[in-house]
Image (tube, grey):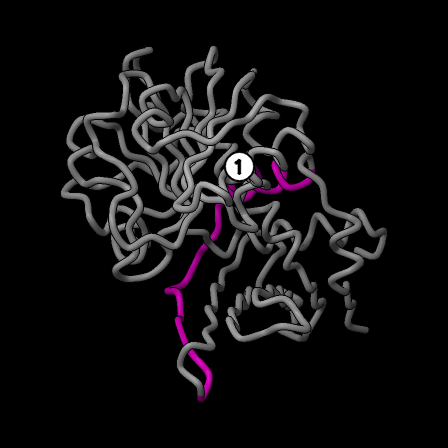
């Protein structure tokens, strides 16, 4: 019998600890991922993405959709379909829009935990939308952050978001210009839909770590390419990152974060290193997240 976890159920089950553990499992998994399929409905701006893969005991696909005209229901949705790896029959369907936000933030926080300086205390976040608060909450769990700076396109949105950060985390947060926010940062997280750099490479101080999650399609871009020449580059999947991720704008190949976690590649080499992690998302993250939710529900 197929198991169904509804959106309300998965939202109640997920938390930062579950998402971070599932992300770590995904990055260390010996599995296979397949090329991303980007599609759209009859109305072209209604878009969806399919990410599929398999690992030990897991096989399936995540369907992420974005219907910008929605008003009565959310514009974003995420559905994970798990197949029985022995028979290929449908095993479980997990609606996971909220859990996907946790999952995305967990990957970026895992990179922070692996690559950022241990004494990182000032976090700068670019973006004031739905995903940005999840990013702040996840990062502040892995580093002793005591100050959050918010860089947004609209000053009123940046002020409102800074207030939300303080309300949810208890940390002092304030809006800042892009230059001031970058120059003061130990960790930068970008959570935008930008198609051009958000800041100047020269503003990035030695020792900074950047987790960028906004680039997930051709033409998307959040970071200045000039930065990559002096930074150590990391990502979830190198082939995907240079095709649809942030490093489609880089001239050198990034290192897989999973290789660093497994001790097969070097991460940060000195306190002065600038490290950049590109998170374009991959199917094993979704499959391990769905399995973790099913286990927590007691139905797997």
Residue at the spot 48% in from the left edge and 45% down from the top edge: 30
- Which region is colored magenta? 18-42
| Closer to us: 57 or 47 | 47
Name the residue carrying label 1: 159
Name the quadrant of the N terminus. Answer: bottom right
Q: Which x, y percent locates residue 61?
A: 55, 66
Residue at coordinates 51% horizontally, 71% vertically from top-left?
68
- How crowded pointer 1 is (Cα within 10 Å; few <14, some 14-19, many 20+) is rated as some
Residue lying at the far right of the rendered structure: 298
Viewer-closest of 217 and 125: 125
Direction from residue 263 to residue 15 in the image, left or right = right
Point out residue 100 in the picture as x, y percentages from the top left corner: 60, 53
Looking at the picture, how far across and down is residue 203, in whole percent? Answer: 24, 25
Q: Looking at the image, which residue is at 47% across and 68% down?
A: 50
Along the viewing direction, whichever of 212 and 270 lies nearer the viewer: 212
Q: Is residue 117 visible?
A: yes
The correct choice, above or below, for 70 with respect to 59 in the image is: below
* Residue 131, placed above or below residue 94: above
**Split into 4 quadrants, where in the image is the C terminus?**
bottom right
Percent coordinates x, y for residue 108 in the rendering: 48, 37
The answer to whether one can see residue 258 in this image is no
At 61% from the left edge and 45% from the top edge, which residue is drawn?
A: 102
Residue 95 as seen in the image, left or right of residue 61 = right
């Amino acid at each position: 019998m197929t198991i169904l976890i509804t959106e309300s159920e998965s939202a109640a089950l997920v938390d930062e600890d579950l998402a971070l553990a599932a992300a770590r499992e995904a990055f260390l998994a010996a599995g296979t991922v397949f090329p991303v399929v980007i599609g759209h409905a009859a109305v072209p701006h209604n878009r969806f993405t399919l990410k599929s893969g398999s690992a030990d005991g897991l096989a399936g696909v995540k369907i992420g959709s974005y219907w910008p005209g929605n008003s009565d229901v959310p514009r974003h949705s995420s559905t994970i379909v798990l197949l029985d790896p022995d028979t290929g029959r449908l095993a479980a369907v997990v609606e996971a829009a909220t859990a996907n936000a946790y999952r995305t933030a967990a990957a970026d926080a895992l990179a922070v935990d692996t690559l950022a300086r241990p004494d990182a205390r000032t976090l700068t976040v670019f973006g004031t939308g739905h995903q940005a608060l999840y990013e702040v909450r996840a990062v502040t769990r892995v580093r002793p952050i005591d100050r959050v700076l918010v860089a947004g396109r609209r000053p009123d949105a940046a002020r409102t978001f800074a207030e939300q950060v303080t309300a949810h985390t208890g940390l002092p947060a304030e809006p800042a210009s892009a230059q001031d926010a970058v120059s003061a940062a130990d960790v930068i997280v970008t959570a935008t839909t930008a198609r051009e750099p958000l800041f100047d490479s020269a503003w990035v101080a030695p020792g900074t770590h950047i987790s960028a999650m906004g680039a997930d399609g051709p033409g998307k871009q959040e970071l200045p390419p000039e930065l990559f020449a002096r930074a150590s580059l990391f990502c979830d999947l190198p082939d995907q990152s240079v095709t649809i991720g942030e490093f489609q704008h880089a001239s050198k190949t990034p290192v897989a974060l999973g290789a660093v976690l497994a001790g097969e590649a070097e991460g940060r080499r000195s306190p002065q290193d600038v490290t950049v992690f590109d998170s374009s998302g991959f199917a094993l993250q979704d499959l391990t997240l769905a399995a973790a939710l099913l286990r927590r529900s007691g139905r797997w």
